[in-house]
Image: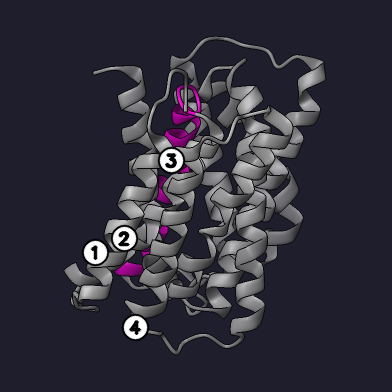
Amino acid sequence: MSKRTLALLAAIGATTIYGINHTIAKGVMPTYVTPFGFIFLRVVGAAILFWAISIFGPKERIERRDWGRLLAAALLGMVINMLSFFKGLELSTPINSAVLVTISPIIVVALSAFFLKERITLNKGLGIALGFVGAVSLVLFGAEIRQDAPNIPMGNALFIVNATAYGAYLIVAKKLVEKYHPFTLMKWLFTIAVVINFPITFSDFLEIQWTTMPLWAYAVVTFVIICTTFMTYLFNIFAMTELRASTIGAFIYVQPIFGILFALITGKDNLTLVKIAATGLVLVGVYLASKKVGAKV
């Protein structure tokens, strides 16, 4: 199996986890864990895991000139991105988060063209357009609206901030990925994230009532730390070694698909013609956006 195929599988794996996380994480907030308390657990847990696996990677030192870019990547990808998404998820609905996260690939393509000088091919442009139409159709016409959302406008605004920060993170981190091993990058990015997030999230972490939390809530917290944080960031950073940032961004369009599939499996949604058609558009869009034409895509 080629490295590029593995990179595509890694991107799909990360997107799958993100897709089902919209519903899973919402289930424990804010009753058992507040959004900011969740972020404390995510960054600390991921930092520990990445330092643990870094012993299997090369011994690298970050050059002084790269610390600024590392700080910017951590701020975008592990602070603003995480805080805005989880707070938005508390205030709005998983369905709204699924549709608004699709803004990110548009941002990635625009920033990639501007900063990385990536060429926007006809296939990529068409793929992004089809993916956007499919994702919007999927979440607007093919999913049930949830009512446990106290401030949808504010939550939706935070989802837009989340999508923008994540798109910018992919651009900033791309240059670092070309220079350092993924294990080296992740351990330092999450270490920086722990320091920045600590004063914002630690008080919420202290409010968690561990003794009264049901077993299933512990399982959700574990899933978010290991799968939604550790595995997805590792998968995406590996995917960036073989794929363009704009291609990885296009995989965000698949998130609504996995979100609805998860809802079907758990009996919380049903299959309709609209969902089937929209899913087809999303898949075609991602295929066109990630299709290899001569060089890395």
How crowded pointer 1 is (Cα within 10 Å; few <14, some 14-19, many 20+) is rated as: some
Mark 4 and mark 3: span between their CA atoms? Answer: 29 Å
How crowded pointer 4 is (Cα within 10 Å; few <14, some 14-19, many 20+) is rated as: some
Q: Measured from the top left, where is residue 179 in percent x and y?
A: 62, 15
Measured along the vertical axis of the image, is residue 82 above or below residue 245?
below
Q: Is residue 27 left or right of residue 199?
A: left
Query: Mark 3 belongs to which amino acid?
Result: Ala
Magenta: main secondary structure equals: helix
Task: State the residue position of label 1.
Answer: 261
24 or 203: nearer the viewer: 24
Q: Residue at x 68, y 41 (%)?
A: 111
Mark 4 and mark 1: span between their CA atoms? Answer: 13 Å
Task: State the residue position of label 2.
Answer: 257
> Dot 2: what SS?
helix
212 or 10: nearer the viewer: 10
Mark 1 and mark 2: span between their CA atoms? Answer: 6 Å
Q: Is residue 36 visible?
A: no
Q: Are marks 1 and 2 in contact (CB under 8 Å)?
A: yes
